[in-house]
Image (cartoon, rainbow, N blue to C red):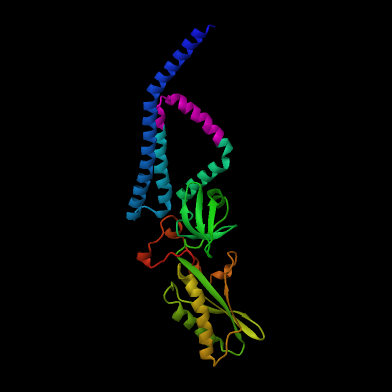
């Protein structure tokens, strides 16, 4: 090929490239502006929705985080679609490519998709909410955030826990903040020579004086065991959720002080908090003491202002 023809072909190619670039660059600039504006609006809209949720008491705090994330992602996806359309990308071809890519990504990220499915189920069934103190096989802590992928918790001693949703959905769990009341019981060992009726009066008096703030029922004191050297009494009753930790400390201290005052310095041989097993039928002295189903255990927790129940993550 002669040199002149090569130069003419190169010039023709460069002119064509320049013309295409001149026609494409404005669309590219507009697409970049759309992306910048879209990402900015996504952040601002997420912030506005967060503030709106914070000012409204009707939207549960548990679902606020996921709803804000969904709003932000929807705006970002719409922005990307508009920007790609601006540079000439056909939506039908794009959807076909996204479908194939989505299948490949889905197979590669099965664990992530499992976390998303688990997060949706956690938000739907609500076994726990933000602020609840939960216990699993691996850890326990206060729930600070429930997301589409992970949950953020804080342990009792202040450690941050980053838990994938699947690790919470596929294991057993105890929610210490869900029920409206907790059963507390103490096993008190006193000398055999202490009169039984007087010992029982001391236990009931200790409960009434120190557990009155969170008390939901009258205390019950009864003889559990009798040995040649000692008698073992059980004191138990129900307190409001949120008052459990305080009642555990104060009532045990009150039992010791009351015994010392009543019996001239004599102290109980042992004071031990007991937690009856679920399979132990002796937890209930009568049929009326067995806990019944409550709306608290479904989805609508009783409001603190209506019945005095205070939700506490570390009760």
In-front residue for pair 125/298: 125
User: Residue lying farthest bottom?
Assistant: 264
User: At which x and y percent is residue 7?
Assistant: 48, 11
- At x 36%, y 52%, the residue is 59
Task: Identify the magenta region.
Answer: 81-105
Question: Number of numbered discs present?
Answer: 0
306 shown above or below 235? above
User: Residue lying farthest top?
Assistant: 2
31 shown above or below 162? above
Check if residue 157 falls in the magenta segment: no
Can residue 134 be seen in this snapshot? no
Q: Main secondary structure of the magenta part?
A: helix
User: At which x and y percent is residue 48?
Assistant: 34, 48
The answer to which image quadrant residue 299 occupies is: bottom left
User: At which x and y percent is residue 114?
Assistant: 55, 43
In-front residue for pair 80/302: 80
In-front residue for pair 71/37: 37
User: Residue lying farthest right?
Assistant: 228
In-front residue for pair 290/109: 109
User: At which x and y percent is residue 175?
Assistant: 51, 60
Can residue 121 be seen in this snapshot? yes
The answer to which image quadrant residue 256 occupies is: bottom right
Q: Quadrant of the N terminus?
A: top right
148 shown above or below 299? above
Could you tell whether 299 is left or right of 118 in the image? left
């Amino acid at each position: 090929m002669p040199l002149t023809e090569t130069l003419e072909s190169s010039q023709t190619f460069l002119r064509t490239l320049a013309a295409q670039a001149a026609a494409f660059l404005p669309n590219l600039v507009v697409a970049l502006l759309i992306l910048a504006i879209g990402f900015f609006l996504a952040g601002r809209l997420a912030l506005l929705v967060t503030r709106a949720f914070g000012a409204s008491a009707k939207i549960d705090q548990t679902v606020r985080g996921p709803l804000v994330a969904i709003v932000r992602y929807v705006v970002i996806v719409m922005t990307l679609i508009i920007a790609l359309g601006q540079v000439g990308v056909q939506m039908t071809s794009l959807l076909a490519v996204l479908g194939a890519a989505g299948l490949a990504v889905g197979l590669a990220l099965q664990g992530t998709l499992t976390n998303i499915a688990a997060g949706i189920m956690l938000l739907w069934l609500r076994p726990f909410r933000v602020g609840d103190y939960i216990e699993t096989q691996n850890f326990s802590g206060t729930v600070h955030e429930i997301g589409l992928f992970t949950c953020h918790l804080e342990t009792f001693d202040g450690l941050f826990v980053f838990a994938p949703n699947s690790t919470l959905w596929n294991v057993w769990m105890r929610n210490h903040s869900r029920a409206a009341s907790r059963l507390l019981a103490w096993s008190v060992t006193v000398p055999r020579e202490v009169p039984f009726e007087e010992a029982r009066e001391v236990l009931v008096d200790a409960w009434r004086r120190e557990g009155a703030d969170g008390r939901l029922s009258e205390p019950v004191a009864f003889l559990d065991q009798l040995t040649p050297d000692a008698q073992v009494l059980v004191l138990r009753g129900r307190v409001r959720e949120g008052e459990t930790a305080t009642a555990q400390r104060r009532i045990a201290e009150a039992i010791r002080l009351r015994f010392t005052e009543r019996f001239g310095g004599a102290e109980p041989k042992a004071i031990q908090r007991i937690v009856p097993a679920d399979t132990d039928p002796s937890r209930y002295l009568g049929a009326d003491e067995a806990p019944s189903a409550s709306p608290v255990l479904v989805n609508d927790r009783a409001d603190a202002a209506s019945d005095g129940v205070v939700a506490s993550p570390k009760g």
